[in-house]
Every structure is written in C-alpha cells, then in structure tokens.
C-alpha cells in the first residue's frame, strides 16, 4: 500500500509486541514524513471552549459566544491550520480529490457508546458540485448520525471575511430519531469563528434535543 | 474565433472569457470515455460517493468527472515574426542546429543529446526562428518550473517580436493565443493539437520520466514534430536512437570547448551530518568558497537547516532553497548576483541553473536519492562560463555507489568523445 499523500510505498515495521498482541495489524494511511508535516494541537494547553492551540484560558472569541447566551461547545481539534493543512484542504475540498478522505482516519477516532456523532452536512449545491460531502468523507469510518440538513446559502463560508462569517444566518434544520442518546458530538472539518457549529447546536436544541452537545473538528 | 487550441472543461471556459453561446458551432466531448480520461489519456479513475468517477491523474489541474464536458477549441496559424537574437553559434552548435532543423522540417522527432552547458538553448534559436518566421506555433516545455523560469526571459529576449506566454502552475491564463509558449509539461494538458513544433527540455528529469501522463500531454498538445533535449537520455530514448526511430545530434563539448569538470570523490565518514561536516570536509568547502560561489546539494530537505546553521557558524554566507520554499526563485536570483557565496539546496536545482564561476559539492553522494543522471546534472552546474571552465566538483560520500561510478564514467566518456 502507498501513502495517500505522497504515494510512496508504506513500510510496515511491526514490533514483536504488536505481532504477539492478537490485535489486527493495520497499516497506517500516511507515511511518518507526511504525518509530521501536520501540527497536532496539544489538548492540555488548548482553549477549553474552541480548542485553539496555546490558550489554556477561555479565549476572547469563546467569552463572546458565552456573553451571547450560547452554551460552550467545548470543541477539540486534532490539528492546527498550518500551510500543510491548508494545502490538504485545498486538494480535498477545493479540487475535490475524494481519495484523500481517509488520510486522517487513523487519527480521527471517537467514542461511539451512548453518543451520536453528528456531522455538519454540506449544502445541496456544494454536494452536487463536489460529488461528496467533505465532513462525512473525513469521518466516514465512524458510525455517523445524519440528523442535520443544510439549506443552500448565498456564499460559502470560505469566501467571507470574519465579520461576514459571524453574521451568517441559520441554515440548519435537525430531524431527530425517536431514541436519543445522552450525548451528541458535532463533527466538522474546520473551526474558524465557530459560527457554523453554534448554528448546528441551536438547530439541535430547537428540534428538542436536551442532552449534552460538544464538538470535534479536524482543524482549528 | 481566436485560434486558441485549448482543451478546456466546461468549468474552465469562463476563465478564458468564453461562454457556451460563443461556442455554438462546437460540440464538446465527454471528458471520460470508456474508462479513460480524454484530457490526460490515463486510466486512473476513482469513484465519488454520488456515483460519478473522476480522473486522479490530472486532478491537480482541476477535476474531471464522468459528467464533465471537454471543449477542444480549434487552433490556427500564428503571426509570423523574426528573431531578434544576434549572437553567434560555434561550428559544432551550428551543425547540431542544422541537423535538428532538417529533421523537424521532414516531420521527424529529434533528440539533441548535449552535455550540460553545451548551449542547448542557443542551438534552439535558429530552429525556433525558422518556425516562427513561417507563422507556426512553438512550445518550449520542461518538467521543471525552475527551468521554465530560467528559459522564459532568454526566449523573450531572443524573440522580442513574437507574443510569448509563460505557463506554470498558478500562472495567469494567456489572453491571446501566443506565438511562442514556454511552459511546464503539466500545463500542456490544457492544449490540443496546437503546437507545430514542440521542444521538450530535460526529458530525463523528474517527474517526466515517472509520469506517463506528461508524455501523453506532449503527444496531444502538438501537431508537428518534437525536439527532445537531454544531457542524460534514459534507456528507452537511447534505444529509439539506436533503432533510428529518432534522429539525433550529439554534442560532447561545452560551448567554450573545455571538457566537463570530472567529479572528485572523497570518501569520508559524514558521521555528524547534517549537524556538522567533518573538519577536513569543511576546510575543503571553505577553500572552494574563498574564490568562487559554491552550490551544495544535500539529499533531504530536513538537512538544509542544521547544515546551513553549521556553515554559517564557520563564517560562510549561506542561504537555502528547496521545492516547497516560496522564496526559491528570489534566493537563486540573489545567488546569481553574488549576494552570498554558498547556496545549500536539494535536487530541485540540479537542472537549468547557470551560475558563472561556481563549484559544486554533493553531500552524501551515496544517498539513494541521487541517481546517476542527477549526479551528472549536479556536476554540470560547475564550469559553465568560459572564464572559469574548470570549477571543481566534489562528491562527499560514505560509500562508492553505482550511481557515482556511472556518473563519473559518463562524464569521462563524454570528455573523451571527439567533437
């Protein structure tokens, strides 16, 4: 098998302990060099509200969300938005290279017991153009609960400035199943201002969900 | 309609200012037919969740899916223009240029097999001039963007009367169809039967040899013969020459007539590399840097920083350049102007850069990263100017490897060959 990013053959250097552990032996999807390009975020020093790196206290953005009356999402992100990550997003979402959807599958692991993993869907128009949903692709290896639906908006978030993003109106609607787990984790690719995720939270609350809602994103 | 010669997807049409309405008389083709991408001629499809498929080979130029339509815009003649270059060729260069012109006038493909620094670009000028003066379109393509950047100003100067387009990833689209196009081989995928003469420089360079798509792009973008340029053609091309499928001219001498500098191998521990060089290795490097510039090649990008810090500590003016470095072009320009003495780089600069009075040091020449043709190219950065044809070339290696032996042997052999 080849590394999904650089197409170089992957080496399998299993340790004796791994060989004797009776667990399935799986190759990682990225070679160590490619993985090293990305900067993981240290959870212990990240902002408790949004998962921003190197901000052990609640950051200004999250304080503003709290002042506006939102319950904090306690977002955790796996990686920082470095140039390497920008290049990945450009290739995956921008060019639409769907092969890359599994690149981070080894890293993106989440608990599934008594938890609904709710991905933030893309707009119908974007889906029609891309042919895939980037968030559902990234987390496709997990059991997902597709409760949210997004209406078409005038302009994608990526083309707006900060103010424009924050003023985006609600475009999510939620359809809840009969049996509800006590916890929901919202999944998205990118946490920038948090606007989209807090809209999703509001949509779930509006539909009558009363459990705990947190969030996980690939990038902060 | 303008003779564009483009091959564009329906999403790309607006980028060149075209609308579907203006193309009423054209019929597009489906971009993917019977499992093959019609843009890049590769069979490398991957499925999308909505049932479509897309081509993974040329996705970097914008995705092509099973629902994409491909418009092949008709091409046409260029505006005739005359050469403004007033230099002269040596008799060997003249002969090679004449041979190339004869071959391409008969519609035959041609290999110009010339050592590094033979003046390949100048040899092309009379051939390109003959085509441009007849109103025929010419493309100069190279797999390396650095080579494109180096060639473009030289062609712009030599053919000031012709309209010139310079294309590489991220460059602007040409507004009018240019008479002369200097481009990366990747960008040729945007053209269809447009060029009456195709010149492919550095055919043996990465990624051309490893990517069949690029050879297909060259085939598809041309409607006339091709001239291949190489100092180190690969086996299949040498075979084609042997079987007379490809006309050839061989130039074993540099334009200044001096032999190629033969690399000196120095077997050394390199134990502290990349943190530091051995004491004697460093002394050798300092010695070289005393009266000329030095290009230092290393096999890995990760080595650049620590080694640069070490050399700086030793009192040398050092800068680095690598593939992902956004300032690469500026650094090379500053090096050429003599703003610093040592340029530490990876194989990215093994081709196309011409710096007068410049020695070459390859650190860890035994690394599997360095192929024989790569080593020949690196050694070929030395001795480019007539004023200093014997700049030293030094391979610092832990072991003797086949690639090093092959490279040194090939250089010696070319020096032995009578012009």
Image: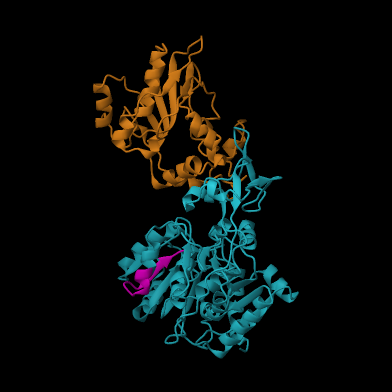
Q: Colour of chain B?
A: cyan
Across and down, in percent, residue B145 comes to 48, 63
**Location of residue B376 with respect to A117 vertically, above or below:** below
Q: Residue furthest top?
A: A178
Residue A96 percent coordinates (x, y): 52, 41
Which quadrant, please, contains the C terminus of chain A? top left
Q: Is residue B342 magenta?
A: yes
Colour orange maps to chain: A
Which quadrant: the N terminus of chain A? top right
Tag count: 0
Q: In this view of the protein, which residue sits in the foreground, B389 or A188?
A: A188
In the displayed structure, does residue A96 sit left or right of residue B275? right
At x 61% / y 50%, what residue is drawn? B25
Q: Which residues are magenta?
A: B333-346
Question: Is residue A42 shown above or below A34?
Answer: above
Quadrant of the image occupied by residue A72:
top left
Q: Position of residue B117 (x, y in %)?
A: 51, 79
Residue B227 in sight here:
yes
Q: Is residue A193 magenta?
A: no
Q: Is residue B144 above or below residue A214?
A: below
Residue at image coords 33%, 33%: A165
Q: Residue furthest right?
A: B243
B235 sits to left or right of B403: right
Q: Point out residue B283 in the picture as x, y percentages from the top left corner.
A: 38, 75
Q: Which residue: 26% across, 22% down?
A: A66
Q: Nearer the viewer, residue B331 or B160?
A: B160
- Colouring of the image: by chain
Residue nearest the observer in this picture, B160 or B334: B160
Q: From where the camera sits, is residue B401 visible?
A: no
> In this image, B9 relative to B30: left or right?
left
């Amino acid at each position: 098998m080849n590394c999904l990013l650089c197409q170089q053959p992957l080496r399998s250097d299993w340790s004796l302990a791994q060989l004797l552990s009776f667990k399935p032996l799986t190759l990682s999807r990225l070679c160590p060099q490619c993985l090293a390009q990305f900067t993981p975020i240290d959870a212990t020093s990240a902002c408790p509200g949004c998962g921003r790196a190197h901000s052990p206290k609640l950051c200004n953005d999250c304080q503003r969300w709290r002042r506006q009356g939102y319950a904090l999402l306690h977002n955790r992100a796996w990686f920082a938005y470095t140039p390497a990550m920008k290049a990945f997003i450009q290739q995956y979402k921008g060019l639409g290279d769907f092969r890359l959807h599994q690149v981070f599958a080894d890293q993106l692991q989440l608990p599934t017991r008594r938890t609904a993993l709710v991905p933030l869907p893309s707009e119908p128009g974007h889906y029609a153009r891309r042919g895939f949903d980037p968030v559902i692709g990234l987390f496709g290896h997990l059991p997902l609960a597709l409760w949210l639906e997004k209406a078409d908006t005038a302009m994608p978030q990526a083309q707006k400035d900060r103010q424009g993003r924050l003023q985006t109106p609600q475009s999510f609607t939620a359809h809840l199943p009969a049996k509800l787990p006590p916890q929901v984790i919202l999944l998205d690719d990118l946490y920038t201002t948090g606007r989209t995720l807090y809209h999703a939270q509001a949509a779930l609350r509006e539909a009558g969900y009363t459990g705990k809602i947190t969030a996980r994103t690939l990038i902060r | 309609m303008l003779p564009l010669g483009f091959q564009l997807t329906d999403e790309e049409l607006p980028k060149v200012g075209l609308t579907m309405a203006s193309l009423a008389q054209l019929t597009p083709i489906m971009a993917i037919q019977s499992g093959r991408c019609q843009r890049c001629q590769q069979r490398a499809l991957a499925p999308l969740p909505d049932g479509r498929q897309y081509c993974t080979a040329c996705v970097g130029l914008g995705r092509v899916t099973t629902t994409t339509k491909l418009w092949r815009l008709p091409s046409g003649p260029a505006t005739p223009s005359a050469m403004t270059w007033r230099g002269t060729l040596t008799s060997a260069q003249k002969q090679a240029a004449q041979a190339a012109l004869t071959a391409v006038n008969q519609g035959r493909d041609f290999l110009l097999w010339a050592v590094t620094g033979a003046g390949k670009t100048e040899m092309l000028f009379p051939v390109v001039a003959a085509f441009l003066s007849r109103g025929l379109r010419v493309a100069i393509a190279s797999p390396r963007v650095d080579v494109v950047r180096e060639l473009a100003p030289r062609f712009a100067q030599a053919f000031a009367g012709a309209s010139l387009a310079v294309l590489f990833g991220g460059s602007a689209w040409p507004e009018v169809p240019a008479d002369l196009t200097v481009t990366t081989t990747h960008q040729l995928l945007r053209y269809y039967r447009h060029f009456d003469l195709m010149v492919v420089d550095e055919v043996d360079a990465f990624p051309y040899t490893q990517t069949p798509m690029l050879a297909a792009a060259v085939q598809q973008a041309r409607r006339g013969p091709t001239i291949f340029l190489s100092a180190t053609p690969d086996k299949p091309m040498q075979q084609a020459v042997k079987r007379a499928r490809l006309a050839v001219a061989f130039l074993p001498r540099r334009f200044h007539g001096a032999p190629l500098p033969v690399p000196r191998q120095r077997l050394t521990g390199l134990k502290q590399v990349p943190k530091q060089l051995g004491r004697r290795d460093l002394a050798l490097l300092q010695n070289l840097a005393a009266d000329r510039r030095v290009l230092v090649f290393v096999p890995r990008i990760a080595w650049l920083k620590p080694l640069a810090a070490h050399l700086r500590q030793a009192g040398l003016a050092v800068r680095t350049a690598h593939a992902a470095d956004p300032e690469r072009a500026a650094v090379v320009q500053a090096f050429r102007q003599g703003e610093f003495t040592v340029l530490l780089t990876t194989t990215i600069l093994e081709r196309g850069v011409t710096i007068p009075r410049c020695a070459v040091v390859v650190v860890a020449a035994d690394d599997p990263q360095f192929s024989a043709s790569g080593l020949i190219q690196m050694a070929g950065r030395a001795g480019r100017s007539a004023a200093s044809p014997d700049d030293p070339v030094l391979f610092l290696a832990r072991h003797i490897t086949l690639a090093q032996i092959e490279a040194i042997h090939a250089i010696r052999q070319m020096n032995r060959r009578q012009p």
